[in-house]
């Protein structure tokens, strides 16, 4: 029952109704979702993994908090909630022994604008090992990019940063979510909805941008990686 009670807790903490949360989940998954679904999940009905990811994204929390929001887990997560910037170099209060290195690419990925990644002169930042809580994520596959454009508003804004779990030749599960892709030789950050033989819907969270389909609108679509987390520009840089 911890999942159901945690879901209700974080929904109320976000100050949104079951209906409003259902609308957010539906926008993320593309599946019909109503307040009755949210109500049943809060009452202990089993929930699909894709809906769990969508709920966490809609509530702007790591999905592990829906299962375990103990003080120990909260302390781990709090270690990477804030990043400070200094002259375009990222500084983390951590030592080499308890941290990982992540590549930061020059250039930017597009969100409605054309993105260009320069593989030369990359920088590196160090993050606490607590940053990578998912056992399926390998730190060496994480890379960081700046975002240009507003097609993913309000989820991802202009000048935000995204940290991508790069495919690096690996196979991936076709789970709906936000991906880094190559569309017609431009690098874009987009939400993907997989439709089997009907191709892939390429979706902008900003409804002013049209939805594309890989079979109809794009000469070539290559998935480069999946969003791990993103950094929201605010007072300093704060991880979402």
Image (tube, helix red, strand yellow):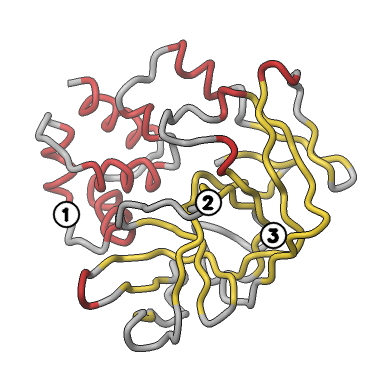
Image coordinates for residue 172, horizontal then vertical, percent: 36, 52
Image coordinates for residue 92, horizontal then vertical, percent: 75, 28
For marks 1 and 3, give the CA distance. Answer: 33 Å
Q: Which residue has dot 1 on it?
A: 34
Q: Circles 3 and 2: CB distance less than 8 Å?
A: no
Q: Secondary structure at mark 3?
A: loop
Q: Disc 1 vs disc 3: which is toward the camera?
A: 3
Q: Nearer the viewer, residue 3 or 135?
A: 135
Residue 160 against residue 221 in the figure, above or below: above
Q: Which mark is residue 74?
A: none
- Give whichever of discs 1 and 2 has the lower sequence position: 1
Q: Which residue has dot 2 on it?
A: 166
Which class describes the residues within 10 Å of circle 2: few (<14), some (14-19), or many (20+)? many
- Give whichever of discs 1 and 3 has the lower sequence position: 1
Q: Which mark is residue 159?
A: 3
In the displayed structure image, the side of residue 192 where residue 44 appears, left or right: left
Q: Disc 1 vs disc 2: which is toward the camera?
A: 2
């Amino acid at each position: 029952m911890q999942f159901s009670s945690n879901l209700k807790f974080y929904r109320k903490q976000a100050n949104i109704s079951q209906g409003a949360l259902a609308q957010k989940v539906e926008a993320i998954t593309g599946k019909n979702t109503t307040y009755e679904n949210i109500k049943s999940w809060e009452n202990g009905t089993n929930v699909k993994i894709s809906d769990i990811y969508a709920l966490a994204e809609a509530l702007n929390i790591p999905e592990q908090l829906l299962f375990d929001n103990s003080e120990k887990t909260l302390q781990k997560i709090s270690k990477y909630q804030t990043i400070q910037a200094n002259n375009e170099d990222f500084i983390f209060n951590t030592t080499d022994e308890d941290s990982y290195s992540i590549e930061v690419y020059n250039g930017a990925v597009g969100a409605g604008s054309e993105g260009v990644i320069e593989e030369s002169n990359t920088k590196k930042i160090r993050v606490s090992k607590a940053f990578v809580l998912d056992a399926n994520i390998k730190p060496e596959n994480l890379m960081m990019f700046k975002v240009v454009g507003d097609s993913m508003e309000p989820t991802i804004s202009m000048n935000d940063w995204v940290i991508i779990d790069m495919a690096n030749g690996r196979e991936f599960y076709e789970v709906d979510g936000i991906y880094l892709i190559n569309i017609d030789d431009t690098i874009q950050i987009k939400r993907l909805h997989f439709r089997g033989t009907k191709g892939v819907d390429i979706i902008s969270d900003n409804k002013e941008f049209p939805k594309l389909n890989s079979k109809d609108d794009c000469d070539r679509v290559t998935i480069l990686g999946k969003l791990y987390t993103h950094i929201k520009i605010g007072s300093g840089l704060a991880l979402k």
